[in-house]
Image: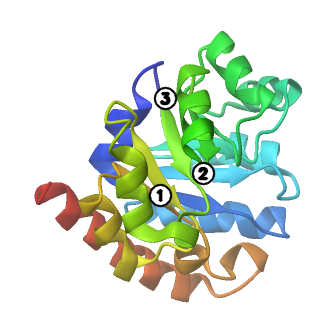
């Protein structure tokens, strides 16, 4: 992924899967299943055990046109470590020092923000995408109100977003959604991969339809 590409990729694929688990092996298996079922943007949070090794391993088996990144990237050293592991983008939960560092290193960044001040700071600080988080607190109506004065900011809705809510966020102006629990479930903690595969197929089908109707 080249600098500047992240907004177009989120808009094209609509879903960024968020893997936050308690097992390195389960996290890798989860990422593999998601990629096999057509999810093309996968984030491994750095709070997951062995996250950097998981990113490196997942990158090695990802099909062409898929992208693996690092989430919960908080400080400058996190950005460097993620880049060394092969992360193609980074995601933050807030406007943290990692946003400017990612811009400095040329790594696409989706930065978390909730208020107008935070959204503006994230975007002007170098984030390519602003992650409205937690989106469920305000819902699609809040996203629309936030986006109205900032039409130039590509917003991605994250936090409590499932298939039944995702369309409303796109209608409100989001370019895509980040999905953790509603998609991943307990798979990254050792839960059923068969159930994960079923959910991934449903989300991938929704994303395809959402892309075609945009």
Q: Which residue is mark 3?
A: 128
Count of marks, rendered view: 3
Label 3 Cα neighbours within 10 Å, binned few <14 / some 14-19 / many ≥20: many
Q: Which residue is mark 2?
A: 114
Residue 214 versus residue 33: which sits nearer the camera?
214
Identify the disc placed on residue 157: 1
Q: Secondary structure at mark 2?
A: loop
Q: Neighbour class for label 1 at 10 Å: few (<14), some, many (≥20)?
A: many
Residue 15, image x, y percentages = 41, 58
Q: Position of residue 70 (x, y in %)?
A: 69, 42
Q: Say whether residue 25 is left or right of residue 110.
A: right
Q: Farthest residue in the top direction?
A: 104
The reply to whether dot 3 and dot 2 touch (C-beta < 8 Å) is no
Residue 26's disc is none
| Residue 63: % across, % down | 43, 46
Residue visible at 27% across and 71% down in the picture: 206
Decide if residue 164 is on the left or right side of residue 2: left
Of the pair 179 and 205, the residue shown nearer to us: 179
Compared with residue 20, is residue 130 higher up or lower down, i.e. above or below?
above
Q: Residues within 10 Å of mark 2 (few under 14, many from 20)?
A: many
Name the residue at 75% across, 50% down. 54
> Can you say which quadrant of the picture contains the C terminus?
bottom left
Mark 1 and mark 3 lie on one chain; the one further toward the N terminus is: 3
Query: Going 85% across and 31% down the picture, which residue do you hit?
Result: 75
- Where disc 1 sits, the SS reads strand
Residue that appears at 67% across and 13% down? 105
How far separated are the C-alphas under marks 3 and 2? 16 Å
């Amino acid at each position: 992924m080249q600098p500047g590409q992240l907004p177009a990729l989120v808009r094209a694929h609509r879903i960024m899967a968020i893997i936050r688990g308690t097992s390195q092996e389960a996290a890798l298996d989860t990422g593999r299943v998601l990629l096999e079922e057509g999810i093309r943007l996968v984030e491994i949070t750095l709070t997951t055990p062995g996250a950097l090794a998981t990113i490196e391993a997942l990158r090695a088996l990802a099909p062409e046109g898929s992208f693996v990144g690092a989430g919960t990237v908080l400080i400058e050293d996190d950005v460097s470590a993620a880049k060394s592991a092969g992360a193609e983008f980074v995601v933050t939960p807030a406007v943290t020092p990692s946003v400017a560092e990612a811009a400095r290193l040329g790594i696409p960044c989706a930065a978390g923000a909730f208020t107008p001040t935070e959204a503006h700071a994230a975007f002007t600080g170098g984030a390519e995408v602003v992650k409205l988080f937690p989106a469920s607190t305000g819902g699609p109506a809040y996203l629309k109100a936030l986006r109205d004065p900032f039409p130039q900011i590509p917003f991605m809705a994250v936090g409590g977003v499932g298939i039944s809510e995702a369309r409303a966020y796109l209608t409100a102006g989001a370019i895509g959604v980040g999905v953790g629990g509603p998609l991943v479930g307990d798979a990254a903690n050792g839960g059923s991969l068969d159930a994960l595969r079923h959910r991934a197929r449903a989300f991938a089908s929704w994303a395809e339809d959402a892309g075609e109707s945009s």
